[in-house]
Amino acid sequence: MNNLLVEAVNNNIQRFIFTSSMAVYGQQKPPFSERLPRRPEDPYGAAKAYGETMLEIFSRIHNFEHVIPPPPQRLRPTTEHCRPVRNVLGIWINRIMREKPPIIYGDGKQTRAFSYIDDVTPAIVSAGLTPKAKGQIINIGSDQPTAVGKACKLLLEVMGSEYKPQYEGARPGEVKHACCTVKRSINLLEYETKHSLKDGLEKMVEWAKNVGPQQPTYTLPLEIEKGAPRVWVDRVM
């Protein structure tokens, strides 16, 4: 993030868009509004909160515009489904195609608001062009939370799979319930949810099947094994 901000200043950019994360809100009561303070619960959220703060400081000192549109959990066709972290739906799809059951950490009752990438992207583009978005934090995405276990069940139905989810211990620092208010994005960026969770999953599954199953890759070593999920330590994704 620091390198990007330095290059932004040196190249006289007019507006910097930082697609942060609702992880910055932590365990506060959902739905998270843009007025809530940053209270991250895990290193990922802390890194995003740091990025937001640095952007605000750089923007003020060096006189360029900024917008922070934190997106929700996204349904996005991407080769990220071969990574063992983040993008849970993609990871599940890849495991099922590799003839392995999907893994759920915790009891599956934790909730997330999933949005298809084609719904989110136009709003992010608008964040870069709309004058009234200047200096704003604008939550983007669906405001309809879904239990992770229910999302997994729906995915198995879409893929016609008879697998049952494999349950592992809850990940330390994971927020139990997370969704955001999106009224500001509707008013300022004309955000609209056009795809249901099932719609998005069908498109995502179709893309993934065309690409084919991928061998999970670990681009960085696991520096801290203590408290890490067993499947990360054992490399059994």
Image (spheres, rainbow, N blue to C red):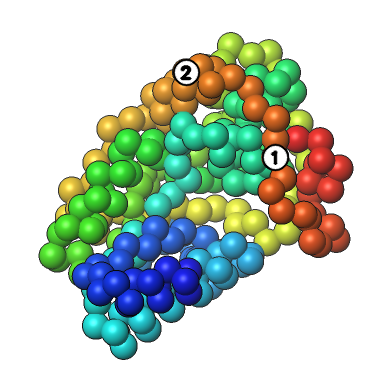
Of marks 2 and 1, which one's residue comes earlier in the chain? Answer: 2
Foreground residue, 69 or 29? 69
Residue that badge 2 annotates = 206
Which structural element holds mark 2? helix
Left or right: 213, with 63 as reference point: right
Q: Which amino acid, mark 1?
A: Thr
Q: Position of residue 75 (x, y in %)?
A: 45, 36
Q: Which amino acid, mark 2?
A: Glu
Q: Position of residue 2 (x, y in %)?
A: 48, 74
Left or right: 160, with 170 as reference point: left
Quadrant location of the C terminus in the rendered image: top right
Foreground residue, 193 or 9? 9
Query: Which residue is situated farthest in the front direction here?
Result: 11
Residue that badge 1 annotates = 217
Of tags 2 and 1, the one toward the viewer is 1
Q: Residue 139: which quarter of the image?
A: bottom left
Visible residue check, residue 94:
yes
Q: Residue at x 70, y 21 (%)?
A: 98
Q: Residue at x 47, y 71 (%)?
A: 3
Q: Residue at x 25, y 44 (%)?
A: 122
Q: CA distance from mark 2 to mark 1?
A: 22 Å
Visible residue check, residue 108:
no
Q: Residue 36: which quarter of the image?
A: bottom left
Q: Position of residue 128 (x, y in %)?
A: 23, 58
Which structural element holds mark 1? loop
Foreground residue, 97 or 15? 15
Left or right: 67, with 89 as reference point: left
Foreground residue, 205 or 111? 205
Q: Position of residue 109 (x, y in %)?
A: 62, 42
Query: Which residue is situated farthest in the bottom direction here?
Result: 61
Q: Is residue 182 above or below residue 17?
A: above
Q: Residue 118: which quarter of the image?
A: top left
